[in-house]
Amino acid sequence: MSTILVADDDRDILDLVAFKLSAAGHELITVTDGATALTEARRAVPDVIVLDVAMPGMSGLDVCRELRADPVTSAIPVVLLTARGQESDVEAGFDVGADDYLVKPFSPRELQSRVTAMLSRARA
């Protein structure tokens, strides 16, 4: 079983993502802000992190940047989940070290497939 940290300030999206990934057999850690996401990532060192970009206090981009700078969390695969879908937004996400970028509205099945692919690559 893999542990996945999901951070999103929209409770409906957080619940949807948590339901879909837990139904696939993953253990979930859910948080609603960036600072808590960073704290939990350092504490639990999950197998994958799913981050909303626009969160109060600390954005998902800032969290991803901090994760990449910390040797404890630098190798954790990160999926950015956001309503920002312009080319410059996607580029900014990859520039801070995201492994994948999914634009809202999104397919929960597609998110699950992307997480599964990340986990497979990490184990290989």
Image: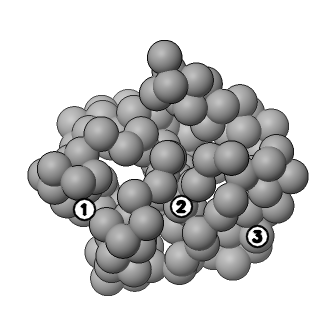
Q: State the image quarter where residue 35 is shown.
A: bottom left
Residue 27 seen in the figure: yes
Residue at 30% x, 39% y is 75
Residue 114 seen in the figure: no
Q: On the rendered structure, is 3 left or right of 54?
A: right
Residue at 23% x, 54% y is 72
- Please say if the residues under marks 2 and 1 sit with CB atoms less than 8 Å apart: no
Mark closer to the observer (2, 3): 2
Residue type at mark 3 is Asp
| Separation of marks 1 and 3 at Cα, in angstroms | 23 Å
Residue at 71% x, 30% y is 113
Residue type at mark 1 is Asp
Q: Which class describes the residues within 10 Å of circle 3: few (<14), some (14-19), or many (20+)? A: some
Q: On the rendered structure, is 73 left or right of 27?
A: left
Determine the residue located farthest toward the right in the rendered image: 23
Residue type at mark 2 is Leu
Q: On the rendered structure, is 66 left or right of 124?
A: left
Q: Where is residue 6 in the image (x, y as percent from the top left)?
A: 56, 62
Q: Where is residue 89 in the image (x, y as percent from the top left)?
A: 35, 42
Q: Is mark 2 on a helix, strand or loop?
A: strand
* Closer-to-camera residue (87/78): 78
Q: Name the residue under label 3.
A: 15
| Separation of marks 2 and 3 at Cα, in angstroms | 13 Å
Name the disc covering residue 96, or none.
none
Q: What element carries label 3?
A: helix
Q: Is mark 1 on a helix, strand or loop?
A: helix
Q: Mark 2 points at which residue?
A: 5
Q: Mark 1 points at which residue?
A: 62
- First-in-chain label (1 vs 3): 3
In the displayed structure, 99 sits above or below 58; it is: above
- First-in-chain label (2 vs 3): 2
